[in-house]
Image (spheres, rainbow, N blue to C red):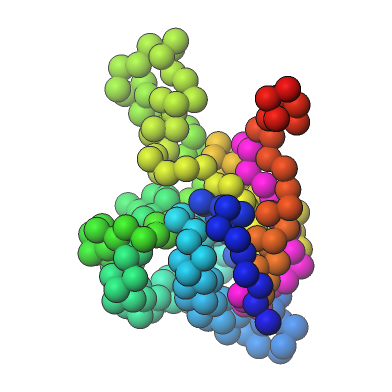
Amino acid sequence: MTQNISAPAVPRHVAIIMDGNGRWAQSRGLSRSAGHRAGAENVHVIVSECRRLGIAHLTLYAFSSENWNRPKAEIGVLFSLLLEFLRRELPLMQEKGIRLSVLGDVDGMPLPQRTALRHAMQTTAGGRDMVLNLAINYGARAEIVNAVRACLHDGLKPEDVTEDTVAARLYTAGQPDPDLVIRTSGELRLSNYLLFQCAYSELYFTPVQWPDFGVEALHAALTDYAGRSRRFGKTQEQINGR
């Protein structure tokens, strides 16, 4: 049974570290490839529900820059699933007004995936109902370094390099920072994910593995978020105006 989440409690931006595909498969005597496929299929469920709830920005950690260290066969499966996902979901994203954005080094990806991602971003550029960010070939430290280099390249003086000027050169420029970061499968770390943007994000860790993280698990995370008091470094008295 799903829960109703009140509009004021719905975060503008949710970021998810989709973890546990391999362990999900292993516990069922399946291959890691089967786990990744189940995880890819679950993306549709979560994207659809987030859009229905009115979440304007959803960021999914799909492939980190460190994931290149995995076996080549597993990387091949992940990139094949990405192509399948784009072919299957692109018409739906157009229909539902979902704009696709990629956070990460697209140029460092294989040509078929690079081409498909750029086509999908161009095709969905007019989407106004939701932004779906896929963090692919992404690492937060590299993102911050590249943003600082861009500041220098643009001729900014040291005193002009501020949080705002750096933020304007991140992959997420123009988007709100994540209100809520969810990590599935029980790990308690951010794994080089949106480190600049998540300075004041609420963190939610669940033992549920990504392929099993369905609508009810999402609602449980959002209900937990709704019960928190976000202070952004202020005291409760300051927030209350006292």
Q: Which residues are magenta?
A: 199-215
Residue 229 can be seen in this image: yes
Q: Residue at x 38, y 34 (%)?
A: 169
Residue beneath the point at 54% across and 40% down: 197
Indicate the position of residue 179 as horizontal and vertical percent values.
58, 47
Question: Vertically, is 81 above or below 131?
Answer: below
Q: Is residue 112 visible?
A: no
Residue lying at 35% horizontally and 80% vertically, measured from the top left? 88
Quarter-wise, where is residue 128 in the image?
bottom left
- Residue 98 in the image, given as x and y percentages of width and height: 35, 64
- Against 66, residue 32 (above or below) is below
Residue closer to the observer: 169 or 32: 169
- Residue found 37% across the figure and 24% down from its top: 151
Residue 156, by quadrant, is top left
The image shows residue 12 at horizontal and vertical percentages of 51, 51
Q: Is residue 76 left or right of residue 208?
A: left
Q: Position of residue 107 (x, y in %)?
A: 32, 52
Please say whether residue 212 is one of the residues in the magenta stretch. yes
Q: Relative to residue 193, is residue 38 depicted above or below?
A: below
